[in-house]
């Protein structure tokens, strides 16, 4: 393979993983925007998506589409439980206690998953076969197309929900000013719960569609979650195109770095970028404006 | 330090020195060696988290840098362990000081993520620099520490070695938290803005305490490598950072003895749960969540309360 097609290949796989990071980034920012919480258990939602789908297919013998739906529902229930049992009881929550709680929850979810389904790495078979499609010298897998398609659908749905439905608008109102939202009759608590529901659903969906490409096991959540967070930071914690762009850039850089420099340092590249952005532009790559000074 | 504090420390030191005697160098002594190392690590993190209110999810990086620094210098470059330990501790502290300025400018979640990033990059580096560290298969043949012909090669000797370091760290921390510096840290914890208005150089102080906590962690790392004589990257992963966090939270944020208590409990716990292997991770998670929600003060604050509640009135002593 010559250099050009090799780089094209890196770009395609980078875009695909980048789209996943973007979805996870979106799920981070949905909760962050309505609650100000960074949910450190977000990666666990992603992991659950993959693991539950595999469980539903291999053990319960469900067809793919039902298995995916069941996995997303299951993860959403976990999200609701997390909000009700861990986040809501906390009065006067400081960022520190929220960090501790969500980290604790992530360990708990990971541990229970390990006990229930073991430590083995499992693969989900691709949704529509593995026949590669030739594209200008590089090949693209059908699963890549699924990933791109789902990302676009989620992005559009997300946009529609937050700007054109009453609930979505109410959630945005909460993110601007909780007290004002409360005064105009929006139940902030319910919106927080909703944000966990949507976030868990989007996160687990990301986990389902990446599972055929990267395999899945109880501990994939940490890395995927952190990279999703990195994407969200690059997008300035917004819940739209900026986060998707952040995810895609991250995916491409990571894939190029892994291919051209060293695959061992692949994950280090993502964190290096994360640190760089946090130090230099904590407000995100595409946003103007001041960061919090006080 | 107050007189009552001094007496408390002396009592604690006596307990520590006598603890292994009934155990006669058995398996439990070995566990207590690791309690000592974990106490130092938890203490370092607590100075940062409990006193200054700055979270770090990357303590395992400094622990690992200490361990690998000592390990590599003594095996690959055949240094004497003692100067190696000092050089490594100072280098790690200097490194923490340098990265502290950009890192500690961040707050809350962002700080947590940045320190986590540092931790994970370090872990990846331990795995990938195979020439020096041996990569995933680890680094072996690290010598035991020795003083002249006296080699620290048994559990009991290591116990006194490690706890000697731990006691000194505890004493220094007790002195520090009651000093002007410690008061400054607590002021930053309550309100950084208010602290600044009162003339506390918050930025510098945060970086200093970050470097100090890295220094203690690096020393613990060096001790760990000389006690174990073998190190591998798994001992310095994100999981360890979270374990340390759990120790500090369970013991009690902002309490020196709380760190020791947390280290003791969480080091013994996996030993006790050994028969139910793998359950310990679930227990950690549960502890972290329930403690944060229901007992945010940690055990050091709950135990005296319970004692006060059940002890007959009038004889209640101020714990």
Image (spheres, helix red, strand yellow):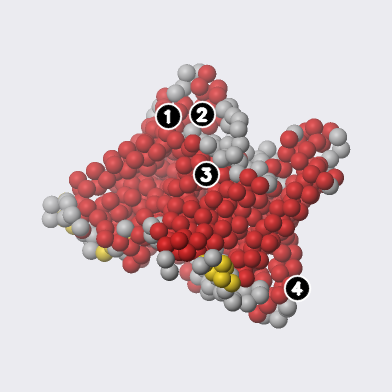
- Residue at coordinates 75% horizontally, 48% vertically from top-left? A159
Mark nearer the viewer, 3 or 1 = 3
- Same chain letter for marks 4 and 1: no
Q: Are marks 3 and 4 on the same chain?
A: no
Tell me the chain of label 4.
A
Would residue A201 be found to the left or right of residue B199 on screen? right
Q: Is there CB contact under 8 Å for labels 3 and 2?
A: no
- Of residue B2 and residue B32, the one placed in the foreground of this image is B32
Q: Is mark 2 in CB contact (under 8 Å) with mark 1? A: yes
Chain-order first, disc 3 or disc 2: 3
Q: Quadrant of residue B177?
A: top left
Q: State the SS at label 1.
A: helix
Q: Can you identify the residue that label 3 sits on?
A: B112
Local secondary structure at mark 3: helix
Q: Is residue B14 visible?
A: no
Same chain, labels 3 and 1? yes
The residue under label 1 is B205
Q: From what the image shows, is residue A258 above or below residue A52?
A: above
Between circles 4 and 1, the one closer to the viewer is 4
Q: Residue at x 40, y 59 (%)?
A: A260
Q: Earlier in the sequence, mark 3 or mark 1?
A: 3
Task: Please tell me how crowded label 4 is: few (under 14), some (14-19), or many (20+) other residues with Cα within 10 Å.
Answer: some
User: CA separation, marks 4 and 1?
Assistant: 56 Å
C-alpha distance separating marks 3 and 4: 38 Å
> Could you tell me residue A60's position as x and y percent?
71, 79
Nearer to us of marks 3 and 4 is 4
Left-right relation of B153 to B316: left
């Amino acid at each position: 393979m010559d250099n050009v097609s090799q780089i094209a290949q890196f770009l395609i796989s980078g875009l695909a993983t980048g789209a996943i990071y973007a979805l996870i980034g979106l799920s981070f920012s949905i909760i962050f925007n309505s609650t100000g919480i960074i949910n450190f258990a977000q990666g666990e939602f992603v992991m659950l998506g993959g693991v539950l789908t595999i469980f539903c297919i291999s053990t319960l013998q469900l067809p793919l589409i039902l298995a995916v739906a069941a996995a997303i529902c299951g993860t959403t229930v976990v999200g609701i439980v997390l909000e009700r049992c861990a986040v809501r009881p906390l009065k006067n929550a400081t960022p520190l206690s929220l960090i501790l709680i969500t980290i604790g929850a992530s360990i708990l979810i990971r541990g229970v998953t390990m006990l229930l389904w073991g430590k083995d790495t499992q693969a989900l078979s691709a949704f529509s076969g593995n026949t590669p499609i030739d594209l200008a010298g590089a090949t693209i897998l059908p699963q890549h197309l699924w990933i791109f398609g789902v990302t676009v659908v989620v992005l559009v749905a997300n946009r529609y929900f937050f700007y054109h439905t009453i609930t979505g608008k109410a959630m945005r109102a909460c993110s601007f000013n909780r007290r004002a939202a409360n005064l105009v009759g929006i139940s902030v608590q319910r919106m927080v719960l909703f944000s966990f529901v949507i976030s868990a659903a989007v996160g687990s969906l990301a986990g389902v569609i990446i599972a055929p490409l990267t395999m899945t096991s109880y501990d994939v959540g940490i890395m995927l979650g952190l990279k999703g967070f990195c994407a969200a930071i690059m997008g300035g914690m917004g819940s739209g195109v900026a986060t998707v762009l952040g995810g895609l850039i991250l995916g491409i850089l990571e894939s190029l770095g892994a291919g051209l420099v060293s695959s061992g340092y692949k994950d280090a590249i993502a964190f290096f970028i994360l640190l760089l952005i946090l130090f230099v532009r904590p407000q995100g790559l595409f946003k103007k404006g001041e960061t919090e000074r006080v | 330090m107050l007189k009552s504090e001094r007496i408390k420390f002396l009592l604690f030191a006596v307990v520590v020195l006598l603890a292994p005697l009934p155990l006669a160098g058995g398996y439990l002594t070995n566990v207590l060696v690791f309690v000592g190392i974990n106490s130092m690590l938890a203490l370092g993190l607590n100075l940062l988290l409990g006193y200054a209110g700055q979270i770090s999810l990357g303590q395992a990086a400094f622990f690992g840098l200490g361990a690998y620094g000592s390990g590599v210098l003594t095996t690959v470059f055949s240094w004497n362990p003692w100067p190696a330990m000092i050089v490594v501790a100072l280098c790690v502290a200097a490194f923490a000081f340098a990265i502290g300025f950009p890192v500690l400018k961040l707050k809350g979640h962002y700080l947590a993520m940045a320190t986590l990033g540092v931790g994970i990059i370090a872990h990846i580096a331990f795995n990938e620099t195979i020439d020096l560290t041996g990569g995933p298969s680890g680094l072996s043949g690290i010598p035991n520490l020795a003083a002249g012909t006296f080699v620290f090669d048994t559990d009991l000797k290591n116990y006194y070695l490690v706890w000697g370091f731990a006691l000194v760290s505890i004493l220094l921390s007790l002195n520090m938290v009651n000093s002007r510096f410690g008061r400054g840290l607590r002021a930053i914890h309550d309100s950084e803005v208010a602290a600044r208005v009162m003339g506390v150089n918050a930025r510098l102080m945060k970086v200093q305490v970050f470097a100090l906590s890295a220094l203690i962690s690096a020393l613990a790392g060096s001790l760990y490598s000389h006690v174990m004589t073998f190190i591998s990257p798994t001992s310095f992963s994100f999981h360890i950072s979270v374990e340390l966090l759990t120790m500090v939270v369970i013991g009690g944020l902002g309490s020196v003895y709380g760190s020791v208590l947390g280290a003791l409990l969480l080091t013994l716990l996996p030993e006790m749960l050994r028969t139910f292997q793998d359950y310990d991770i679930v227990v950690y998670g549960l502890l972290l969540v329930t403690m944060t929600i229901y007992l945010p003060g940690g055990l050091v604050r709950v135990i005296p309360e319970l004692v006060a509640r059940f002890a007959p009135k009038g004889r209640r002593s101020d714990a």
